[in-house]
Image: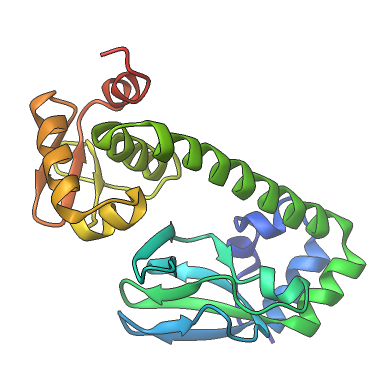
Amino acid sequence: MRTADPTFLAQVPLFHKAPARALEIVSEAVQPRTFDADTVLFREGDRGEVLYILHKGTVKLFKIDLEGHEKTLAILKPPEFFGEMALLGEGGRSATAVCLRETHVYLLFKDDFERLLREYPSISLNVANTLSQRLRGMGDEAQVLSYKDAQGRVAYVILRLYWGGHIDFGETGHALLRLTHQELASLAGTSRETVTRALKALEEEGVISTRPKEVLIKDPDGLEEILHGVR
């Protein structure tokens, strides 16, 4: 009996170009769950037995550094998946995952995940491609966050979320990010106060406008110019 729609599963990067039979297997194997906002799905170091497929809602992945500061690694929206790293080896969870809003997920357990990897090479390739993209993204981020000033770092974070489709659309038709200053600070690796100043400077440039818990992206090209120091 299906618990997930194969049409939705086909949109998940993990199952890109997967055969119809593989999608049928997944649709019958996954278990749906709903979590309230602020629910911690797992903590860094926990043993991992399940992969999460995000159907509705928003999930934040973060780590705590040696000084006790939170560093946001990613803000995830459907149809992304996460939690696969702990299923691929003997290590525990590499980060903590928390629901930012009410969240609906499909759980794919380790035995079923390993079966899919064995039987469908396209899914194994998708896992490898996803890990490669994430590593490249981490390298790009490390370079930006090391060398850019606060305004450039915040511009990069906003653009990364914009490019990744983590947006809604406001009444003006502009892309809209629904994040607090503290959430942006965690992504940019800086303080909330610094983010507030950087957002004000970007607003004065005319590339964004801000409201409580919202950033309206008015000029993505202008943000890129600021990021690359040509404006």
Q: Nearer the viewer, residue 158 or 13?
A: 158
Q: Nearer the viewer, residue 100 or 7?
A: 100
Horizontally, is 31 left or right of 158 in the view?
A: right
Q: Quadrant of residue 222?
A: top left
Horizontally, is 201 left or right of 4 in the view?
A: left
| Residue lying at 53% horizontally and 78% vertically, measured from the top left | 44
Position of the C terminus, as image quadrant, is top left
Q: Quadrant of residue 124?
A: bottom right
Horizontally, is 120 left or right of 102 in the view?
A: right
Question: Residue 96: x percent and y percent?
Answer: 47, 75
| Residue lying at 16% horizontally and 31% vertically, measured from the top left | 202
| Residue 213 visible, this angle | yes
Q: What colour scheme has been applied to the protein in the rendered image?
A: rainbow
Residue projecting furthest to the right: 119
| Residue lying at 61% horizontally and 58% vertically, measured from the top left | 12
Question: Residue 160: x percent and y percent?
Answer: 41, 41
Tell me: residue 72, above or below residue 173. Answer: below
Position of the N terminus, as image quadrant, is bottom right
